[in-house]
Amino acid sequence: MDMHQSSVDLTSEAKSEISPLPEAVLPPTDTATAWLVVLASFLNLMLSIGVTTTYGVFLQYYKLEEFPDASTSFLSWIGTLQTASMCFFGIGAGVLCEHIDTRLLSLCGALISGLALIIASFCNSPWKLLLTQGLMFGAGGSLLYITGLTLPPQWFTKYRALATGIAIAGSGIGGLWLSFATRAMMTSIGRQWGLRITGLIIIGICGPTSWLMRMRFRAVRNERVIELAFLRDCRFALLFFAALFGACGFYIPFYFMPSYSAIVLGKSNSWGTSISSIMNGTSIFGRVAMGLVGDRVGSLNTLCTMTLLSCLGILVLWLPFTSVGPFVAAAVIFGLCSGGIVSLIPVVTANIFGVKRLPSTIGLLMLAYTFGDLISSPPAGAILDKYGHGTSFTSLIIYNGVFLALSTICDILLRIILSRKLWEKV
């Protein structure tokens, strides 16, 4: 049996096992209810992923002011553990979404992640922050992240990429205003109260809106917890490695560009915060705009283009120059294009493998994000310390660009497998 026939059989088998309800009795798609799910997902992602993308502000503060004797690599682990544990626990969260009320899961996520930041506010050493701001926040955030990421595609057919892009834009908007808010709070009332207020905001916003986070359908009880047949599909393998390498390249600029602006360009701490906000701001536009483009020309076509442009922004603009203009241009291009990457991965997954088991399928992809996060920022910080002596970012930037190049290659190979017609909507 060839791979194409295997893929078709996989899809047919999955569909036959999933829902005992015919499509006609399921809630309709593209309705006002569907857009309320998008709103709640937007808020979940704003206060989960949005918080992790502001860790560059914390890293700069920890390294330059609170823990100057700690290594950059160790301090990077706090932010990396946030995202890595969010992705790792997301594997289980995806399975739970198909068997437990997603509204309850979202509520638990709001309480755990909010309390994690409140507890972190009482910690006064890096390793304690690693456990609270890193691990505990990631565990709670995984419930907010997976529900916010996987519910919108289920509720849409015509506007699937746009709706998903709008929901995921919440993470960019969160990163945008939280970057300024975090810096302002640390300056005026201290890091401790800044963390407490952020934790209370998560509980106060995501707790009540969890009631809107409802699955459109649910898997029957007697089916497999995770569809392991996906692991034999070369399409899933390529998507897995594209996600892995993409995750490796995604967080490095968010973590290290603020520090680069201070160390290499000689700018102030607030200027570094502005760079973080620029990336998050352009990422917002990219997530929504690329959703629109994806609905028109194909989500995978758009994903290939955005990954390639992200790679070029890092290697062509950030790597060879040490001046403000190219650096800001690299931040803008990376923010815009990486935003498209984030919003299109779940859409591509839904389009290839279907939406009915999307939570557990995305959960499998979370394993790729977990490994990607673990081998991104901490090694990048170690590279900066060992080869750049804390001041030269050349090796770190090359490390970043190589991962984005590998992700681009995987995306293009997946596109070729699905269709070799250049102008076909895929």
Image: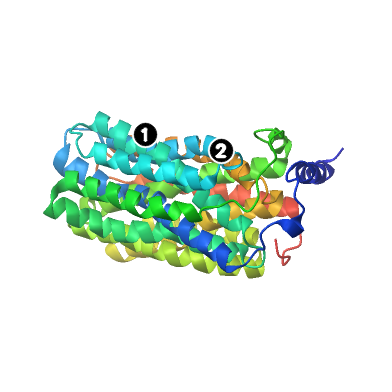
Name the residue nearer the viewer: 168 or 273. 168
**Residue 400 spot, x, y in % from top left:** 43, 46
**Residue 417 spot, x, y in % from top left:** 74, 50
Q: Residue at x 57, y 57 (%)?
A: 152
Label 2 environment density (alpha carbons within 10 Å; few <14, some 14–19, many ≥20): many
Q: Amino acid at mark 2?
A: Leu
Q: Residue at x 57, y 63 (%)?
A: 34
Identify the disc placed on residue 135: 1
Name the residue nearer the viewer: 326 or 420. 420
Q: Horizontal placement of 158 versus 2: left or right?
A: left
Q: Horizontal placement of 398 versus 38: left or right?
A: left
Q: Nearer the viewer, mark 1 or mark 2?
A: 2
Residue 45 seen from this side = no
Q: CA distance from mark 1 to mark 2?
A: 19 Å
Q: Which image quadrant is residue 192 in?
A: top left
**Cβ atoms at labels 1 and 2 below 8 Å apart:** no
Would you name the residue on which mark 2 appears?
Answer: 96
In terms of secondary structure, where does tag 2 sit?
helix
